[in-house]
Image (cartoon, grey):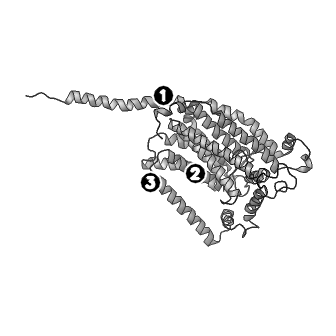
Amino acid sequence: MEHSHGSTSRSKPFFDWILLLLMYSMMLLGVLFVSVATYNPDISAELPLINKIMSSQSGRWQAIFTIASPVAVWFIVSIPYEKFRSYVRLFYYIIIFMLVMVLGSSAIRSVSGWFQLALGRMLQPSEFAKIALILMLARALSSSDIPMSTFKDSIRIMGIFALPAGITLLQGEAGSVIVMAVIFYTMIYFGGVNWKWLFGMAVLAGIGVAIIFGYGVISGSGSYRLLRILSFLDPQKYYNDAGYQILNSQEAIGSGGMNGIGLFITGSHSHLNFVPEDWTDFVFATIGEAVGFVGSSVIILIYFIMTFRMLYLARYTIDKFGRLIIIGVMAMMFFHVFQNIAMTIGIMPITGIPLPFLSYGGSNLLTNVIGVSLVLNVTKNRSVSMPNISINVDLANSIPRKRRNKRKKIFVNTSKE
């Protein structure tokens, strides 16, 4: 990205209250819709809204996560992001260690990816691996003007992605691996990697997906991941299996019509648990039914504004390390939103990718809060690194000229003998 003198005022440090308010607006909506999805009319039919939320165990925990989140925001924003550079590698390897440790844990929906904590809570390291990947890639890609220009550097940067992605895949968490791949590709694109690398990786990825899918079809594999793809192509054929969730999700969203049927409605799809996981990965089905096309469009618009704002902030962040942090967070959030909503309406295969700030779950919610907090940190503290960049550029441009001038004065001889 090139920066002109006219963009200097837009590059000044500031705290982005707009992004923070948008994030908390979505988090409050998340508490509401999780409570709607887990609504029990026998307990809370006549109670006020706050009591309906508190009567839902999932809604209550989501509210607790939301109330506690400002501590994480304050901690991350208060430390200038340049200081994180020294501890990125340590954080990365701690997450790798956690990913390895969780491999032997009890499987939930064919995924061995959670630590069991107190009070029935669970911690999913693969969510935090996305943040570790963003920080580690930002550090590696910002260390040179043209990353992956040598074989050694290429192996190093690809290894940063391959290590957490490979371990996460062994856990059975394919959705998180796809998110990591999107983060990696987006960051190397904005990081200035040669287009040949970008083209080559895209081609290899396409060939790899085609081979895996073709092998699964030919071999008649019963893998639930393959069934998800096949049910996406023909959900009616797999209605009693993997297609059940897609078709019921579409029906729930369609029943919302233009304005929705309302919140906490007895006999609704969400009340009857018509859509499996409608408070976690399929919370958008609950949203579509409750607030309809208009309300769903407003939520999508908020996501669009958040994503576009991050792109805008990255455009006017001169420091490459900070800029790539914003790009990584933007890529993570955009793909989460796109894939989650697309799978609930049936235009993408089902993956275990939650909807940021709206799906139930402490690990994913904290990961997204950390991501947005890092963006706020960069915009608030980006002046810390800007003076060093301008000084280094001046020195790099001026020193060769002085040396060339001195050489001309010393070695040019116009005298005649």
The C terminus appears in which quarter of the rendering?
A: top left
Q: Which mark is residue 182?
A: 2
Residue 180 rendering spot, x and y as whole percentages: 59, 50
Residue 85 rendering spot, x and y as whole percentages: 55, 35
Toward which corner of the image does residue 367 lie, by quadrant?
top right
| Gap in angstroms between the C-alphas marked 1 and 2 | 32 Å
Q: Are marks 3 and 2 in contact (CB under 8 Å)?
A: no
Q: Is residue 349 left or right of residue 387?
A: right
Numbered circles on residues, count: 3
| Gap in angstroms between the C-alphas marked 1 and 3 | 33 Å
**Considering the numbered disc 2 on the image, is that residue within a helix, a strand or a loop?**
helix
Q: Earlier in the sequence, mark 3 or mark 2?
A: 2
| Gap in angstroms between the C-alphas marked 3 and 2 | 18 Å
Q: Amino acid at mark 2?
A: Val
**For residue 110, above or below residue 151:** below
Residue 275 rendering spot, x and y as whole percentages: 78, 58
Q: Are marks 1 and 2 in contact (CB under 8 Å)?
A: no
| Residue drawn at (74%, 66%) of the image | 241
Tell me, yes or no, if residue 142 can be seen here.
yes
Q: Which mark is residue 387?
A: 1
**Considering the numbered disc 1 on the image, is that residue within a helix, a strand or a loop?**
helix
